[in-house]
Amino acid sequence: MSGILEAKPKVGYFYKGEQSGPELNEALSISVDKVKSVPVVIDEETTVYDAAVTMFLEDVGTIFVVKDNLLKGVISRKDLLKATLTGDSGATIPVSVVMTRLAKIVYCYKNDRFIEAVRKIVEYDVDCLPIVVEEGENELRVIGRISKTSISRYILELAKPNKE
Amino acid sequence: MSGILEAKPKVGYFYKGEQSGPELNEALSISVDKVKSVPVVIDEETTVYDAAVTMFLEDVGTIFVVKDNLLKGVISRKDLLKATLTGDSGATIPVSVVMTRLAKIVYCYKNDRFIEAVRKIVEYDVDCLPIVVEEGENELRVIGRISKTSISRYILELAKPNKE
C-alpha cells in the first residue's frame, strides 16, 4: 500500500490512489462488455399494456423488441407513456406500432469503449443502448444493454472507498 | 503541454493528461452545484395528464411538485406511466395523488459532492435528485436538479478530446 493512501485523512468515497488504480482515461476506455446488463426482450406482437407491465416487473426503462432473437425495435418508458396518454391503456395496440424501428436505433458492439457508449447515449438523447452482434445481412442480435443506470453504477464503482 | 500527451497516438476521446487535468478523485468530488440543471416544477393541483405533457415539452424524466416555491413531491415518468396504465389518461387526477411525498424524497444540497449524488441516485434507484436549500422548519426550496443524464454528460465532458 502506498504512502499516499495512508496519508489521506478523508473518509467516504475517494479514488483508490494514483499508484494502485487505473487512470480516468483507462477507466473510461474499458469495453462496454464489462459493464453490460442483461437485456429485457419482448415479441413484437406484445401489447403496449403488457410491455409496460414487463417494464415494471423487470424494473427497466427500455425493452428490446425481437423476432427470432433478432432486433426489430426499442421501446422506452417515454414511448409507452405517450401511447397510454391518449386514454387508451394500450391493451390492444401492439408495441410494434409505437416502438423505435431498427433503422433508427442507436446501438453499440461489445468491444466498443465505455466512453463511446456514453457519448452515444448523451448525443442521441436515449436512456439505453442495445449491445449487438451482426447476424447475416442487416440483422442484429441483442446480447446486452448499457444504460444511464449502468453508467452511474460504473462511476460509483470507480469511486468506492478503498478497502485496504 | 506534457510530453506524455504529445506521445499519445490515439484519436477520439481520452482524458486530458495526468499533468494538465484533475485526477479522477478530484473530478468526482466537485460540488453538484457545478453540474446542476434547471429544475422543472409544477403545482400540486396539476393533473397527471398535464404533468405528462409538461414532461414531454420540457424533455425531462422527473418533475418537482411545489407549493409557494417549497418542495411537496417528486413525480417521475414511471409514476405517470403507472397512473395512465389504468385506462384513465389522468385528465382529472391531481399529481399529488401519485407523486412521491416530501418525507420519502431523496435530495442533496448544492455543496454535496458529485459522487455523493451519484451514490444516492444508484442506491435509492431514482433517476434524479432535487438540489435544495433549507427554508424555515422542515421546508425545502428546490434550486436545481442532478439526474442520470447530468452524470452521463459530466463523464463525457471529462473525456472530451484534448483541444490543445
Image (cartoon, coloured by chain):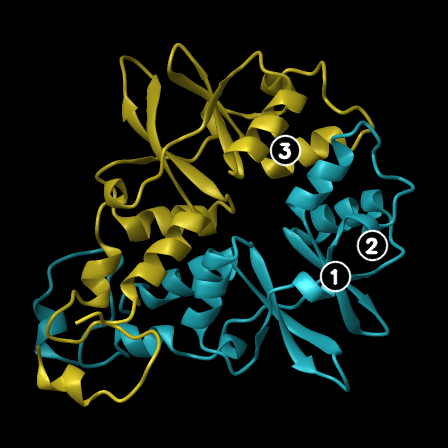
Chain colours: A yellow, B cyan
Residue A30 vs residue B157: left or right?
left
Q: Residue at 36% of width from left, 73% of height from top? A: B28
Residue ID for mark 2: B96
Label 2 SS: helix
Q: Residue at 38% of width from left, 16% of height from top? A: A70
Estimate the spatial distance between the alpha carbons at disc 2 and disc 3, rounded to whole Å.
23 Å
Q: Residue at 71% of width from left, 46% of height from top? A: B56
Label 3 SS: helix
Mark 1 belongs to which amino acid? Gly
Mark 3 belongs to which amino acid? Asp
Say few, some or many: other residues with alpha carbon within 10 Å of mark 1 (under 14 / 14 to 19 / 20 or more).
many
Question: Residue B71 location in percent, x, y?
Answer: 75, 69
Residue A154 vs residue B127: left or right?
left
Residue ID for mark 1: B73
Residue B160 vs residue B80: left or right?
left
Contact (Cβ within 8 Å) of mark 2 with mark 1: yes
Instruction: Tell me: residue B6, above or below residue B9.
Output: below
Quadrant hosting residue B160? bottom left
Residue ID for mark 3: A79
Label 1 SS: strand
Question: Residue B149 location in percent, x, y?
Answer: 51, 56
